[in-house]
């Protein structure tokens, strides 16, 4: 249907990029990117009108998002006939607009396009040997100036390498080394680095990617204050285990897994360093508090959980109550103490759900005067319940009366 609309409008439509790559890799991908040779915005509006969908357009970039009533989305971009001026004023090259669009992409494996117009429906365009690279499991840039054009592609390279189990081509690898040596990153805004870092942290297995960043000495690009101690590998592997443990047990509970990995990277940073890193990467204020103050305060709590010989359930509960899952998992990653791990996991699997049936109304009925004594009594009953001294409503009432 996309192709039919394109033919009606006398333009050509192609499905491109990650979606086509993943077809060849037999991987699920529901992000459909369409490139239109012609006016992508007019195409998106016509198609959306005919199919009861909405569009959101960016006139400046010639792009649009078509959103269907069930929230399914298609990204549309326009490819215009242009001439490509290489960054270092090398010869100007003339290309068809779809080829040009593919040439601007990061890696060969992302340059496949499938024609959608009915006259050539399903024809695969492979201008840069993408099929061969997918078959050989190699990641290659399209030209030697790729990382000069956009140094953040280095982060994307390592992300795809690990996600697909590919290797980085020899030349591409030396271009990365060169980008690091020449410090191409110094002109990249912190915000863009953060975007790429987050994409890495949101991968299913971020740890090996971060270790690859370390191989290329790229963690300092995120921020020079990120302290790389020799326990990073262990910490990252533990982060994977701890988050896997959590995700298996609490399948329905959502949390920001990427933030757990980010805090793991920050684990040797003090408050000042953390705030400077947050500023540079333009991290939103709601995360700053968690990554900075709260995380560092937790380190003190953790020492208690590690060192105190005896702690009853109520003491563990009072130390950890109200903490976000991200911080709970972070503490489990940071400690090597079995005692602390047991205490924290007990809190997260059992204690945090503790509740009592007794309410303020019950206390009123018992003749207790409203005031601070109310919350102290309810807290005492909850602690008694956590420590197994009361088990049911009758025992709660009896305990409150004492
Ligand atoms: P993912 O599976 O992670 O979504 P993707 O390949 O679909 O991967 P996107 O980040 O959604 O990646 O980007 C869509 C397309 O845009 C990619 O296929 C890629 O070719 C191109 N692209 C994205 N970022 C860059 C970049 N920095 N430089 C060049 N091309 C890029």
Image (tube, grey):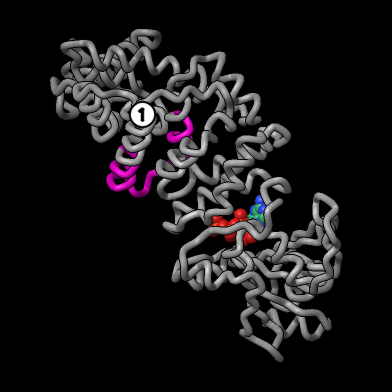
Q: Which contiguous range is marked in magenta?
A: 242-263
Q: Quadrant of ligand 1?
A: bottom right
What residue does disc 1 label? 328
Q: Is residue 256 visible?
A: no
The majority secondary structure of the magenta stretch comes to: helix
Q: Nearer the viewer, residue 18 or 32?
A: 18
Q: Left of 66 or right of it: where is 265? A: left
Task: Name the element at disc 1.
Answer: helix
Residue 165, by quadrant, is: bottom left
Residue drawn where x is 63% and y is 30% of the image: 281
Give the x, y percent position of residue 334. Answer: 34, 25
Q: Is residue 249 magenta?
A: yes
Give above or below for 44 relative to 309: below
Residue lying at the far bottom in this picture: please name it: 119
Q: Nearer the viewer, residue 116 or 226?
A: 226
Residue drawn where x is 57% and y is 41% of the image: 177
Residue drawn where x is 27% and y is 26% of the image: 344
Give above or below for 278 relative to 303: below
Give the x, y percent position of residue 67. Answer: 66, 64
Give the x, y percent position of residue 114. Answer: 63, 78
Q: Is residue 184 visible?
A: yes
Residue 83, by quadrant, is: bottom right
Give above or below for 108 relative to 336: below
Q: Left of 219 or right of it: where is 351? A: left
């Amino acid at each position: 249907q996309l192709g039919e609309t394109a033919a009606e409008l006398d333009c050509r439509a192609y499905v491109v990029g990650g979606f086509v790559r993943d077809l060849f890799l037999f991987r699920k991908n529901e992000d459909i990117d369409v490139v239109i040779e012609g006016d992508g915005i007019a195409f998106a509006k016509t198609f959306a009108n005919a199919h009861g969908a909405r569009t959101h357009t960016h006139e400046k970039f010639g792009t649009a998002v078509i959103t269907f009533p069930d929230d399914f989305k298609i990204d549309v971009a326009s490819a215009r006939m242009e001439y490509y001026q290489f960054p270092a004023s090398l010869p100007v090259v003339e290309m068809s607009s779809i080829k040009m669009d593919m040439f601007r992409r990061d890696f060969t494996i992302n340059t496949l396009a499938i024609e959608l117009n009915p006259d050539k429906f399903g024809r695969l365009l492979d201008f840069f040997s993408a099929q061969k690279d997918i078959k050989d499991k190699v990641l290659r840039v399209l030209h030697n100036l790729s990382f000069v054009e956009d140094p953040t592609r280095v982060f994307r390279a390592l992300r795809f390498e690990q996600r697909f189990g590919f290797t980085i081509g020899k030349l591409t690898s030396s271009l990365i080394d060169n980008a690091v040596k020449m410090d191409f990153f110094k002109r990249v805004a912190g915000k863009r680095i953060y975007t790429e870092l987050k994409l890495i942290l949101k991968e299913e297995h971020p740890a090996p990617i971060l270790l690859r960043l370390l191989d290329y000495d790229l963690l300092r690009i995120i921020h020079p204050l990120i302290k790389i101690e020799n326990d990073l590998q262990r910490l990252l592997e533990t982060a994977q285990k701890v988050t896997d443990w959590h995700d298996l047990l609490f399948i329905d509970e959502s949390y920001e897994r990427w933030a757990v990995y980010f805090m793991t990277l920050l684990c040797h940073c003090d408050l000042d360093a953390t705030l400077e890193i947050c500023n540079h990467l333009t991290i939103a204020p709601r995360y700053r508090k968690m990554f900075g103050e709260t995380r560092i305060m937790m380190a003190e709590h953790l020492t208690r959980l590690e060192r105190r010989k005896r702690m009853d359930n109520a003491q563990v509960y009072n130390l950890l109550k109200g903490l976000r899952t991200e911080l709970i998992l972070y503490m489990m990653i940071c400690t090597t103490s079995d005692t602390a791990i047991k205490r924290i996991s007990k809190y997260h699997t059992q204690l945090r759900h503790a509740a009592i049936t007794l309410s303020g109304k019950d206390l009123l009925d018992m003749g207790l005067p409203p005031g601070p004594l109310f919350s102290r009594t309810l807290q005492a009953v909850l602690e008694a319940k956590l420590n197994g001294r009361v088990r049911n409503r009758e025992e709660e009432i009896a305990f409150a009366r004492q």
